[in-house]
Amino acid sequence: MRHLMSPLDLSVSELKRLMDLAQDIEEHPEDYNTKCNGKKLATCFYEPSTRTRLSFEAAMLNLGGSVLGFSSADSSSAAKGESVSDTIRVISSYADICAMRHPKEGAPLVASIHSGIPVINAGDGGHQHPTQTLTDLFTIRSLRGEIKDLTIGLCGDLKFGRTVHSLIEALVRYPNIRFKLISPEELRVPDYIREEVLVRNNIPFEELERLENAMPDLDILYMTRVQRERFFNEEDYVRMKDFYILDKDKMALAKEDMMVLHPLPRVNEISVDVDDDPRAFYFKQAKKGVYVRMALILTLLGLVEGIFDEDKEDYHA
């Protein structure tokens, strides 16, 4: 039994086969709509979510399975003081696989240690968000053909943004990737990302404060929101929340084939007048997340073969 806590739990070759499966699901959904008949997914979400929770539920329903769970800590026995380890022991008796989001870093890992079913980290504090990273990689590959030779701008909250941390760790394993890290000084990437991931792997990167200065060089711009829930006080949040706003004027500085991605939800960091720009892919990105999660559910439940077998170049549904 395998779990998914981090994108690094999957090798590059395993990621390729998982994305191949996601692509096949996207192109031939009718071949997969009964694969999870009789299977149950538990969505244990200790903090609010729209896209991640609903995309997991849509993924399981598309596969013919069913869903149970809770959407906030207040609606679970966590409100009574039940531990994550006890909760997952109980959930293991009710479901076949679990997707867990928790505000505390490492909580899904604790759950996986005590679980009798596969556990997927659906976001833990400011640490990791592996299925969003799989979605990002799949979107990039779908639109670019390959993941290589790219200058990628990451803009906004790079300190608390778990999507950014996961994406950097995943992308450094691909050839010739360069980063433009665009943020105010207070929201720069954590030292462990800068030193242990970028510097240690000799990845070219530049830290900038002005988005305009980076735009002409970018192949991909990954926007993030400044997250109120990660700040200790409202004053700091209000001061930082409007620091970067992507609009038509800034888009005019970019390449004609640049991609704009965003893990969503958007607040005001991307102006709505960018939505009609053909380079805006964030809503398509959200849709592709369903196919990735379908592929992951099938894989962790053992309903496809060959994803985890390094000796095989294909899977067999």
Image: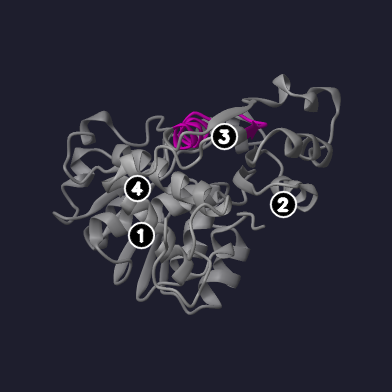
Give the class, few, some or many, for how many residues have Cα within 10 Å of label 1's Cα (few <14, many ≥20): some
Say which residue appears at 40% left-offset and 33% top-offset.
266
In this figure, which residue is indicated by the disc labeled 3? 38
Q: Which mark is residue 61?
A: none
Query: In the figure, residue 243 lies in which quadrant?
Result: top left
In front here: 31 or 247? 31
Q: Amino acid at mark 1?
A: Asp
The reply to whether residue 101 is in sight is: yes
* Magenta stretch in the rendered image: 43-61
For marks 4 and 2, give the CA distance: 28 Å
Q: Nearer the viewer, mark 3 or mark 2?
A: 3
Mark 2 element type: helix
Does residue 71 appear to the left or right of 150 in the view shown?
right
**Seen in the image, is 75 located left or right of residue 122?**
right
**Mark 3: amino acid:** Gly
The answer to the question of whether label 1 and label 2 lie on touching residues, with beta carbons closer than 8 A, is no
Which residue corresponds to mark 2? Answer: 109
Mark 4, residue position:
25
